[in-house]
């Protein structure tokens, strides 16, 4: 393979994986608070996961995902922990690397991704968290896509 083809391949891989995995802590990716308890989010927001032994290779379990989502929801809304209600926490399969939260014009890996979906209620707001691999994101209303159904018809 000559260097031109190698450079083109690297550019394609960078485009594919650069948009799928969060990575940058961009100030525009942080939600702004319009009213207490009412976060508005323009796009997916990366949520930190707790570090544990083997964290680089072992995805977190559902309880770790739920705990991280609850902590983020309380912090993001300023609500006391008892008012953060977990509405649902499900093991799901996402259709691609967007984890069910695709940004228009962004390319994602085209493979099924096992993960979780956690929906949390804080007051009148519902926060939709999507997880897969070592990622947890808060997906804004209107951007969330449902996971795939693997049941045969």
Image (cartoon, rainbow, N blue to C red):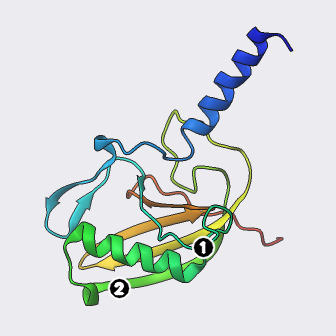
In this view, the residue farthest toward the bottom is 82
Which residue is situated farthest in the front direction here? 53
In the rendered view, tell whether residue 24 sits above or below residue 129.
Answer: above
Residue 70 quadrant: bottom left
Please tell me in which quadrant of the rendered image residue 99 appears: bottom right
Tell me the residue at 62%/63% (across/down): 147
Determine the residue located farthest toward the right in the rendered image: 1
Q: Which of disc 2 and disc 1 is earlier in sequence?
A: 1
For disc 2, the neighbor class at 10 Å (few under 14, some 14 to 19, many from 20) is: some
Q: Is residue 96 above or below residue 88?
A: above
The Cα–Cα distance between marks 1 and 2, rounded to whole angstroms, is 29 Å
- The residue located at (47%, 67%) in the rendering is 49
**Quarter containing the N terminus:** top right
Mark 1 or mark 2: which is in front?
1
Q: Nearer the viewer, residue 94 or 26?
A: 26
Quadrant of the image occupied by residue 55: bottom right
Q: Residue at x 35, y 85 (%)?
A: 85
Q: Nearer the viewer, residue 88 or 131?
A: 131
Residue 50 lies left or right of residue 6; in this view the side is left
For disc 1, the marked residue is 53
The x, y position of residue 78, in whole percent, is 19, 73
Look at the numbered disc 1 and give the secondary structure of its residue: loop
Pointer 1 local density, CA inside 10 Å: few below 14, some 14–19, many at least 20:
few
> Where residue 17 sits in the image (x, y, percent)?
62, 38
Q: Which residue is mark 2?
A: 85
């Amino acid at each position: 393979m000559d260097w031109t083809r190698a450079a083109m391949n690297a550019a394609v891989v960078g485009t594919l994986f650069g948009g799928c995995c969060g990575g940058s802590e961009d100030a525009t990716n942080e939600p702004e608070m319009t009213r207490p308890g009412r976060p508005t989010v323009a796009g997916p927001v990366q949520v930190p996961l707790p570090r544990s032994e083997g964290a680089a290779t072992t995805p977190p379990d559902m309880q770790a995902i739920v705990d991280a989502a609850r902590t983020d929801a309380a912090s993001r809304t300023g609500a006391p922990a008892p008012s953060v209600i977990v509405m649902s926490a499900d093991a799901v399969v996402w259709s691609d690397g967007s984890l069910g939260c695709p940004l228009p014009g962004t390319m994602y890996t085209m493979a099924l991704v096992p993960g979780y979906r956690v929906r949390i209620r804080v007051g009148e707001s519902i926060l939709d968290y999507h997880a897969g691999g070592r990622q947890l994101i808060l997906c804004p209303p209107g951007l969330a896509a449902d996971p795939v159904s693997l049941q045969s018809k």
